[in-house]
Image (tube, rainbow, N blue to C red):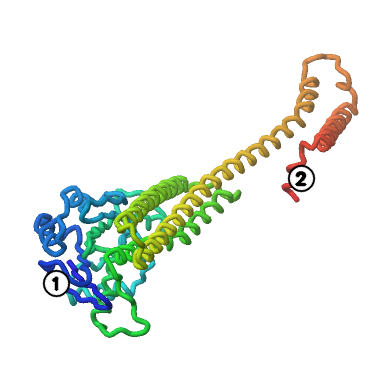
Amino acid sequence: MDIFLISDNQVSQSKEIPDTVPVKGFLWIDATHQEVGADPEAWRNAIALATGVQIYDPHMTDALNPNHPSYFDSTQDYGMVVFRKLMLNGAGGGNGNGNGHSRAAENNAQNTGDKNTAPPAATPESEPGKRRIPAALSKLATQPVTFLIMDHALVTVHERYSRTIDAARTRLLDLCDKPEKTPHSTRPPTSPEDLLLRLINAMVDQYLDLRQPLTTQLDRWQRALLDPRKPFKDWMALLDARIELRKLENLCEEQHDAMQELRDYFVDIDDGIEISRAKDLLLVRINDVMEHITRVLNHARRLESSIESAVQIHFSAVAHRTNEIMRTLTVITALFMPLTLITGIFGMNFIEMPLLKNNAGFWLTMGSMVLIVVGMLVFFQRRRYLESQALDRR
């Protein structure tokens, strides 16, 4: 568990939760599900001493639920946001924050006793009992992060490994090590709401980083679907991609709804006089977060529509090729029908038949067959029955 006391241009770290509400600044109390789940009642009492706010039982249950969707709820004393972020292990080796933050977080963990550093990421293909999902789509695995917004504190509860939280912790530790302010130094958060939106904005940016690999993977499938040289066989992977994109779409809708309710909460808790500059900046920042979520949502819908369009074009192309094959077989059948009729007539067991005993009868029959075939080809050409084949050869 990490506890930071953040005030004007100053950040200090503590290893224990304070037993009084801070007079100046605010607290950031960061805990994992394992730490809270070990003794939920003791943890809640410690939070109550440090913040003066008692967390309700349903919210404690929601904070420890690993399958909880993104949502927002509020009471008279605090607001609660559950936001689903990308899982570190699901990212398979990188989610946009870079390895530098991970190494820094690992060093800080060794110094402060924190154990939130991540092990080597496991690929979904190597885990038994799971579907084989392409690498780009395996990054859509998510986990919830719970934020409790209070007047003088922000409490976060998440799974053990979180690069976003580690990166924010690293930046605050840098501020602790460098108390003097430089012209290019990072400004610390001014309020719990400001820190909340910074963390959520970093989580949403990870979804934006997925757009390029997802687009590349789907473009590869589209080219494979329309390749006439070999049939497309990876239908299960394509179905899994569509399922994952539908999950991403539903996830973004839940996130957008939660952010909309959070924005309304920020507006409602205002005194109704004049919105301060800090409050105005918070509304601008949350609008920016919502706009990023909307961009991810629109991109997921475009990708899903592209998959459906590619599948429809694929079946249209298959149907077109089938029609061309049937057209060729029909022309061949039509050419041989009169020839079969002639051979059938001359194959009848009559004693007296025209040309049967004529020395030139065979050649006359063969010549008539050739003339019939040439005439039918000219007829088909004039009626444009063979036009598509000629265009394909060109």
Query: Answer yes or no: do the residues labelled 2 and 1 have beta carbons within 8 Å?
Result: no
Name the one closer to the observer, 169 or 143: 169
Percent of width and height locating residue 279: 34, 64
Displayed quadrant of residue 163: bottom left
Name the one closer to the observer, 245 or 251: 251
Residue under the image location 50 percent in, 54 percent down: 218
Percent of width and height locating residue 305: 51, 47
Provide the secondary structure element on which disc 2 rests: helix
Q: Amino acid at mark 2?
A: Ala
Q: Residue furthest top?
A: 351
Q: Disc 2 designates what residue?
A: 390
Percent of width and height locating residue 194: 31, 66
Q: Which mark is residue 15?
A: 1
Above-or-below relation of 374 to 154:
above
Above-or-below relation of 125 to 107:
above
Percent of width and height locating residue 101: 31, 73
Q: Amino acid at mark 1?
A: Lys
User: Within 10 Å of the Cα at label 2, are there few (<14), some (14-19), or many (20+) other Cα atoms?
Assistant: few
Residue under the image location 34 percent in, 67 percent down: 278
Distance of label 2 from label 1 (alpha carbons): 81 Å
Residue under the image location 76 percent in, 45 percent down: 390
Displayed quadrant of residue 364: top right
Residue 163 makes an appearance in the image: no
**Tally of numbered tags:** 2
Q: Is residue 165 left or right of residue 60?
A: right
Residue under the image location 37 percent in, 58 percent down: 139
User: Which of the image's four quarters has the N terminus?
Assistant: bottom left
Above-or-below relation of 118 to 33:
below
State which mark lies toward you, 2 or 1. Answer: 1
Q: Is residue 346 left or right of residue 41?
A: right
Provide the secondary structure element on which disc 1 rests: loop
Which mark sits nearer the N-terminus, 2 or 1?
1
